Image (cartoon, coloured by chain):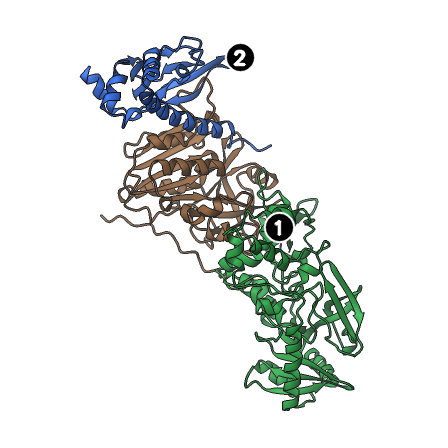
Chain colours: A brown, B green, C blue
């Protein structure tokens, strides 16, 4: 019995105007945190399948558009899943959409997680807060093709126990015997009996071969900076670390200029970057 | 262009050129005087051109002054560029209407017009090529830009007068037009004689020239044209050593000069509005009060605004220092990484139209003067 | 004693200490274990001994009226529990509770402080190691209090 390889799709040639949204319907809406909702959307067959780490531009008609990473299973073509944190007018409007409502969709855009480059290596996934959402498609792929990778570890940190995203799912993953999952919170309450402390603390204790690993890091930028430091301390080379960057996006196709980070466009050259390639610009304040 | 067909026309021939283009259905756009500046707008005849005018330009200064001849193109460049027509300041992208089934999105139909640019300078041809690379040369193509761009008939003009803030020679973008054009003119005034050397740059150009009253160009004509261009090249208002700027700025991101210029910069965004290569845009979604219809409009934006780099929580570039650095390092340094060319064509508009006269050539020299390494 | 010296020598914290110093440190050490839920020490207790965790996790806690018991950090194998023994008044500033079965090396604080005073070379080796722990923990605490996941104002 052969295992069908899931090859990440090459970005579809831009035959259709990339600035015009498709119209899609919300299939389901679920609350995943105090200010986090997950929408399951009916996919438009005209849109190319996404690769883990890519994002779509979602339009709340009448309000505006926002870049949201895909957070669902790339193998599941029947629904397109986005996890959205309500931080502004557009994201809040998106999180208020319910089953049957329509929204605009453009995408998928961007460079995703290095699923192919990581084959044969250990994989350490370091997620902070809502950063677990853009990493979840990568985790689904890792689980689906488990035999192609070495040790797999998920290190997940949030602000508090109430902020743990996809908690039931994380607990189900934790019951597997072939992956290591550690969860920690910055601020515990009396009900929490797990680890307390920043997620970067978990890196020193995780079991992986630092010389044969791919580290996927996603979370607030400060957390990623500390995460890279901790990975370095554990012996991981910058060339083996991947981060997901976030900048203001209006077009997602490198026309509007907003997402520039020094010489790169986050929408086109990222959002996932191999750390050594942006190391110098990562360190420059207000770049 | 060696071997290119050359001819000579008079001002009558030039009027015939405008008529021929109009007859072919082009929307003819050229320079004209309005509000004490030379701007680009629809023109019908030679009478609309800035006959006998020149401009005085310096840091934060622009004045029109009468010439002592009747030159039609005796000035440098004004506050506007062809970007105004190819990448418009505002354009609706789509409109959406709500109905019983949901929402229908309708892309904005394109204006069915072909543009003819009269008087495009070499630096401007370079600027158009730079924007071509940005908006059509990558993985995605701006369909609206391409539609407007592909039909353009360009009548270039080789500058006879260098501007006070010009530095095209430093940027290798002029003054002689060498990039794609249909026809290129060099204005020659010899006392009462007012003629133009015409160089053909395309089949379309050749076909149009054939309809105009013209005579063959003589050695005297071509020599005179070369002399004009050489004189212009020798009288640039500014210079900038441009071979090393990209690396210079990339290694001086923390240079104290950024703080110094930030003390002068008002973040007014004038430079980005007048620059012929700036391409930043933003979008605005607006809807009817009852939510029945929505439109998305794209409009010019500037990296000098606080909104430009805003992500939840605040701007990535809240300080004037970081925003000025962004503009200048993008224009002169990271543009190379992104598109393989400089973003600056040496037109000098940013210097002229800066209310406080910040001079990009001076800023580069200052940083080079104490290069960190 | 030999078994204890081996255990001390093998603990990551004491890596590279050298035979002579390992013997000196072992002279202040003993093997201990705590059952799940058992407290290693309470806030306010004299910091007479500190612990190098070998197995298990320890929750560092504070109790406040209205908030109950809050764990602000969990510490695991390879890491020390307790740094307040280093400076006067040598009193614990929090509770430490075993989250599960914990095995550790307990080191008599007074014994080690005296040996460090007597032999500054040993003192330097011990302080160097604790400095790494303190700096790392401070950096992590900085990140923790920044509340990076918090909803921006």
Residue C27, numbered circle = none
Residue B371, percent from left and from top: 54, 53
The subunit carrying tag 1 is B
Whether A257 is drawn above or below B223: the answer is above
Tell which residue pokes out farthest to the top in this image: C45
Label 2, secondary structure: give it.
loop
On the image, numbered disc 2 is attached to which residue? C66
Q: Nearer the viewer, residue C13 or B114?
A: C13
**Residue at the (57%, 82%) spot, across then down:** B203
Please name which of the two marks, 2 or 1, marks the residue nearer to the observer.
Answer: 1
Of B234 and B157, the residue lying toward us: B234
| C-alpha gap between disc 2 and disc 1 | 51 Å
Q: Is residue B54 visible?
A: yes
Residue to which mark 1 is pinned: B324
Circles 2 and 1 on the same subunit: no
The location of residue A193, given as percent across then percent down, is: 40, 20
Q: Residue at x 72, y 83 (%)?
A: B16
To which chain does the residue with label 2 belong? Answer: C
């Amino acid at each position: 019995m052969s295992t069908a390889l899931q090859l990440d799709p090459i970005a579809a040639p831009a035959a259709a105007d990339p600035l015009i949204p498709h119209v899609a319907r919300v299939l389901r809406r679920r609350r995943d945190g105090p200010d986090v909702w997950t929408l399951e959307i009916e996919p438009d067959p005209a849109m190319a399948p996404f690769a883990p780490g890519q994002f779509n531009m979602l339009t709340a008609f009448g309000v505006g558009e926002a870049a949201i990473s895909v957070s669902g299973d790339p193998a599941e073509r029947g629904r397109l899943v986005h996890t959205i944190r309500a931080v502004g007018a557009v994201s809040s409007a998106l999180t208020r959409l319910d089953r049957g409502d329509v929204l605009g969709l453009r995408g998928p855009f961007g460079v995703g997680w290095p699923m192919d480059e990581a084959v044969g290596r250990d994989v350490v996934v370091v997620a902070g807060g809502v950063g677990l959402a853009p990493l979840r498609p990568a985790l689904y792929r890792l689980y689906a093709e488990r035999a192609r990778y070495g040790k797999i570890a998920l290190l997940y940190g949030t602000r508090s126990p109430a902020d743990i995203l996809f908690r039931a799912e994380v607990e189900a993953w934790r019951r597997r015997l072939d992956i290591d999952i550690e969860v920690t919170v910055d601020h515990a309450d009396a009900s929490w009996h797990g680890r307390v402390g920043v997620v970067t603390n978990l890196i020193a204790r995780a079991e992986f071969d630092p010389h044969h690993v791919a580290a996927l890091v996603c979370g607030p930028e400060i957390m990623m900076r500390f995460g890279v430091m901790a990975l370095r301390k554990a012996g991981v080379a910058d060339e083996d670390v991947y981060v997901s960057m976030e900048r203001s996006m209006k077009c997602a196709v490198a026309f509007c200029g907003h997402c520039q980070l020094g010489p790169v466009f986050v929408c086109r050259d990222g959002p996932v970057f191999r750390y050594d390639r942006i190391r110098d610009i990562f360190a420059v304040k207000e770049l | 262009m060696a071997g290119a067909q050359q001819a000579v026309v008079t001002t009558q021939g030039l009027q015939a050129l405008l008529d021929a283009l109009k007859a072919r259905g082009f929307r003819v756009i050229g320079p004209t005087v309005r509000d004490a500046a030379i701007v680009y707008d629809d023109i019908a005849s030679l009478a609309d051109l800035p006959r006998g005018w020149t401009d005085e330009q310096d840091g934060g200064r622009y004045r029109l002054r009468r010439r002592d001849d009747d030159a039609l193109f005796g000035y440098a460049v004004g506050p506007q560029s062809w970007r105004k027509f190819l990448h418009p300041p505002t354009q609706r992208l789509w409109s959406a209407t709500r109905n019983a089934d949901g929402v229908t999105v309708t892309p904005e139909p394109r204006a069915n017009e072909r543009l003819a640019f009269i008087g495009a300078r070499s630096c401007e041809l370079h600027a158009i090529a730079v924007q071509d690379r940005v908006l059509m040369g990558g993985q995605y193509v701006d369909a609206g830009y391409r539609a407007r761009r592909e039909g353009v008939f360009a009548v270039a003009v080789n500058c006879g007068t260098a501007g006070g803030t010009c530095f095209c020679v430093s940027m290798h973008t002029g003054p002689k037009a060498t990039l794609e054009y249909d026809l290129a003119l060099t204005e020659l005034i010899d006392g009462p004689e007012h003629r133009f050397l015409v160089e053909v740059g395309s089949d379309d150009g050749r076909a149009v020239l054939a309809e105009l009253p013209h005579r063959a160009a003589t050695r005297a004509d071509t020599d005179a044209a070369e002399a004009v261009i050489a004189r212009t090249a020798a009288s640039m208002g500014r210079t900038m050593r441009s071979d090393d700027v990209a690396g210079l700025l990339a290694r001086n991101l923390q240079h104290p000069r950024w703080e110094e210029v930030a003390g002068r910069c008002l973040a007014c965004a004038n430079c980005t509005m007048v620059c012929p290569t700036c391409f930043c845009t933003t979008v605005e979604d607006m809807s009817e009060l009852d939510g029945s219809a929505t439109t998305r409009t794209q409009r010019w934006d500037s990296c000098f605004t606080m909104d430009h780099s805003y992500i939840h929580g605040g701007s990535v570039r809240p300080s004037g220092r970081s925003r000025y650095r962004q503009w200048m390092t993008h224009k002169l340094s990271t543009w190379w990484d992104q598109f393989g060319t400089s973003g600056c064509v040496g037109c000098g508009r940013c210097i002229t139209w800066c209310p406080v006269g910040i001079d990009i050539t001076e800023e580069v020299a200052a940083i080079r003067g104490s290069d960190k390494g | 004693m030999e078994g204890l010296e081996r255990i001390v020598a093998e603990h990551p914290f004491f890596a590279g200490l050298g035979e002579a110093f390992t013997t000196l440190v072992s002279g202040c050490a003993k093997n201990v274990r705590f059952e799940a839920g058992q407290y290693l020490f309470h806030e306010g207790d004299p910091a007479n001994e500190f612990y190098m965790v070998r197995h298990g996790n320890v929750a560092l806690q504070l109790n406040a009226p209205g908030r109950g018991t809050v764990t602000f950090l969990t510490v695991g194998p390879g890491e020390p529990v307790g740094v307040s023994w280093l400076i006067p008044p040598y009193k614990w500033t929090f509770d430490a509770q075993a989250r599960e079965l914990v095995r550790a090396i307990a080191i008599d604080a007074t014994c080690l402080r005296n040996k460090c005073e007597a032999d500054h070379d040993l003192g330097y080796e011990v302080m160097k190691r604790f400095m790494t722990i303190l700096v790392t923990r401070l950096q992590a605490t900085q990140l923790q209090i920044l509340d990076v996941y918090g909803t921006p104002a």
